[in-house]
Amino acid sequence: MKAAKHTVLNAVGTRSSPRTYTHAVVGEVDYARKAVWTIADAAYRANDEFEYFTIITARPVGATYYANGSSPHFTISDNMKAEAAKWFAKHGTELAAIVAARKAQAAAEVEALRAKNEGAAFVLQWSMSAGNASKALGTWTKRHYKNVRVAEVIRKA
């Protein structure tokens, strides 16, 4: 079976497939919601990295770190010590400053995306029936998308 090209009017996204997609879930990015999620994720990752590298820095090479008190999680190596030193040299040792910098960076990245794609609709999911596409609407509206709707697919052989 030959692959056909599938597109949706007024939405970014194409797909070549031998399957017959008839509908697609289409939506716009809600940049306010995306910013909240992205900034929170950046703060979480900064905290996680800081804790990991602090654990490595505080222990001698060859020591085994026990995450939950009983089973070995990892053994400190020279490479890990060097990686921790590089990380602290790059980011500093003040957790609040590291988190603030990561949050600012994440906010700037989301703002750059918003400036580039404001108002653009994207194909979020391809579907072989209107019913299946309709079922998927709830999933996509819970995420950082708005104006989510089902659209018909244009199929070109």
Image: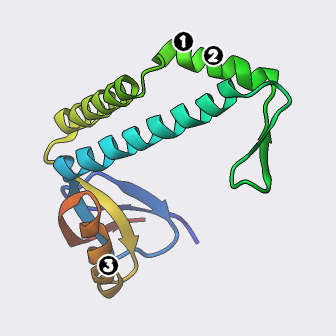
Q: Which residue is drawn at 61% across and 15% down?
A: 86
In front of the other: 22 or 120:
120
In front of the other: 65 or 89:
65
Q: In the structure shown, which secondary structural element does the residue marked by tag 1 occupy?
A: helix
Question: Outermost residue toward the bottom?
Answer: 131
Q: In this view, does 15 lie to the left or right of 37?
A: right
Q: Residue 85 carries which label?
A: 2
In front of the other: 157 or 91:
91
Quote the CA–CA distance across marks 3 and 2: 50 Å
Q: Residue 89 carries which label?
A: 1
- CB-based contact (under 8 Å), mark 1 and mark 2: yes
* Figure colour scheme: rainbow
Q: In the structure shown, which secondary structural element does the residue marked by tag 3 occupy?
A: helix
Looking at the rendered image, the quarter that the N terminus falls into is bottom right
Quote the CA–CA distance across marks 3 and 1: 49 Å
The amino acid marked with disc number 3 is: Ala
Residues packed near mark 2 inside 10 Å, few (<14), some (14 to 19) or many (20 plus) = some
Question: Outermost residue toward the right?
Answer: 62
In front of the other: 109 or 95:
95
Query: Which quadrant of the figure has residue 43?
Result: top left
Q: Which residue is drawn at 48% across and 19% down?
A: 93
- Please state the horizontal and vertical placement of residue 16, each as a whole percent of the image: 47, 59
Question: Outermost residue toward the top?
Answer: 89
Q: Which mark is residue 133?
A: 3
Q: In the structure shown, which secondary structural element does the residue marked by tag 2 occupy?
A: helix
The amino acid marked with disc number 1 is: Ala
Q: Is residue 150 left or right of residue 136?
A: left
Residues packed near mark 3 inside 10 Å, few (<14), some (14 to 19) or many (20 plus) = many
Mark 3 or 1: in front is 1
- Please state the horizontal and vertical placement of residue 61, each as a whole percent of the image: 82, 25
